Image (cartoon, helix red, strand yellow):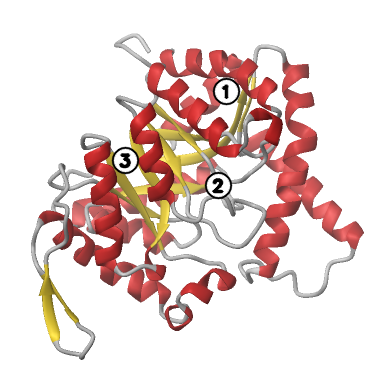
């Protein structure tokens, strides 16, 4: 099992130096302690994650304060961007980081995000999948033709030319089983989360991913399945509960409101405050017990082993859902020890 760090929200107080200072601190910690990557999302127009409108900008900064850790878009919303603009931006980051860029590619889900590209919302899935080959071609230096300002087909070659021949590419897949198969058939990795499912159901989707790779003539054992998990590891279980419960409940409420507003969730009717609180409480109990990396080193190691049995190759530890910076700092040595426990032949 490999471990990486992921950002998704915005819950850091200004007296901690602001969110970007904390992102930099945690990225440096990951760099110094053998974590695979740091994932930076693309989010828009909401308090939940709105500080991440362009992951390439933050990755460019992190390139200068880290040396080894991979810098990953987790995820870039492909239908909101021209493929050439996306490749140009991340090619710059590839240079600044000496070839440490990877990209997770998502279709997008929040209808409000598409004020940036309103015509793309209805066909976002088709655009998402169609543009993958364009991104690969442009990155590799193969010209791609697009209409210019006069409508004339114009073959372009993006610059600067990136350092890597190809970045690692992930397809972001959550609810639709066929997306896992699609990722396998295209030879991509998978970035996923436990969206209303447990590890048993995830194992079924991972099997589709491996089946897709085999169907494409690829070794089904290759390819990386990365699972995003909200994370807090500490030897004191009382501290875990204290650090996580209040902030995570608020995070769930903010996330639920965002999904309702963005029409990714349909409750069927306007929720009363009591119903809203009940849904948040139910979600918290499910996450804390079965869908997050919360607990002691022993408990979280057991969960990571169960995830590995389900076919997960990497856990992306989501850090910024609300615990105080002091609590996060107290947990980091235990998370690093958990990562180290999976190293070597005896792991």
Mark 3 and mark 1: Cα distance apart in space: 21 Å
Q: Residue at x 62, y 26 (%)?
A: 232
Q: Residue at x 73, y 17 (%)?
A: 237
Nearer to me, 229 or 62: 62
Q: Is residue 221 visible?
A: no
Mark 3 and mark 2: Cα distance apart in space: 16 Å
Mark 3: secondary structure: loop
Please identify the residue farthest to the top as the structure is shown: 346
Reply above or below: 201 against 115.
above
Q: Which mark is residue 186?
A: none
Q: Position of residue 46 (x, y in %)?
A: 64, 59
Nearer to me, 259 or 303: 259
Which residue in the protein does label 1 denote?
Answer: 300
Mark 2 and mark 1: Cα distance apart in space: 16 Å
Which residue in the protein does label 3 denote?
Answer: 224
- Residue 341, located in which quarter of the rendered image? top left
- Residue 246, located in which quarter of the rendered image? top right
Reply above or below: 70 against 171.
above
Q: Quadrant of the C terminus?
A: top left
Reply above or below: 240 against 255.
above
Query: Label 1 neighbourhood size at 10 Å, few (<14), some (14-19), many (20+)?
Result: many
Reply above or below: 334 against 45.
above
For marks 3 and 1, the one nearer the N-term is: 3
Which residue in the protein does label 2 denote?
Answer: 194
Q: Residue at x 69, y 36 (%)?
A: 14
Q: Is label 3 in contact with label 1 (beta carbons under 8 Å)?
A: no
């Amino acid at each position: 099992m490999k471990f990486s760090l992921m950002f998704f929200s915005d819950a850091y107080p200004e007296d901690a130096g602001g969110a970007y200072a904390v992102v930099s601190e945690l990225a440096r910690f990951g760099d110094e302690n053998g974590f695979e990557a740091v994932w930076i999302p693309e989010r828009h127009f909401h308090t939940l994650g709105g500080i991440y409108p362009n992951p390439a900008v933050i990755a460019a900064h992190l390139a200068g304060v880290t040396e080894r850790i991979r810098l990953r878009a987790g995820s870039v919303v492909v239908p909101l961007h021209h493929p050439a603009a996306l490749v140009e931006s991340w090619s710059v980051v590839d240079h600044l980081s000496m070839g440490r860029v990877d990209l997770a590619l998502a279709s997008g889900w929040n209808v409000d995000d598409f004020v940036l590209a309103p015509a793309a919302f209805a066909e976002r899935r088709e655009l998402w999948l169609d543009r993958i080959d364009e991104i690969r071609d442009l990155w590799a230096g193969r010209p791609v033709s697009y209409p210019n300002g006069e409508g004339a087909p114009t073959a372009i070659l993006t610059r600067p030319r990136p350092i890597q021949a190809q970045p690692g590419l992930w397809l972001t897949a959550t609810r639709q089983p066929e997306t896992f198969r699609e990722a396998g058939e295209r030879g991509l990795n998978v970035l996923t989360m436990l969206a209303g499912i447990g590890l048993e159901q995830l194992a079924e989707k991972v099997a589709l991913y491996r089946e897709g790779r085999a169907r494409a003539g690829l070794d089904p054992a290759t390819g990386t399945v990365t699972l995003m998990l909200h994370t807090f590891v500490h030897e004191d279980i009382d501290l875990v509960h204290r650090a996580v419960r209040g902030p995570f409940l608020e995070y769930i409420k903010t996330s639920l409101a965002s999904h309702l507003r963005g029409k990714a969730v349909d409750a069927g009717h306007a929720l009363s405050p009591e119903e809203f609180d009940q849904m948040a409480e139910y979600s918290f109990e499910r996450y804390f017990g079965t869908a997050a990396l919360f607990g002691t080193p022993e408990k979280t190691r057991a969960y990571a082993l169960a995830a590995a049995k389900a076919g997960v190759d990497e856990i992306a530890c989501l850090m910024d859902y609300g615990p105080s910076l002091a609590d996060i700092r107290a947990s980091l040595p235990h998370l690093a020890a958990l990562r180290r426990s999976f190293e070597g032949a005896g792991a």
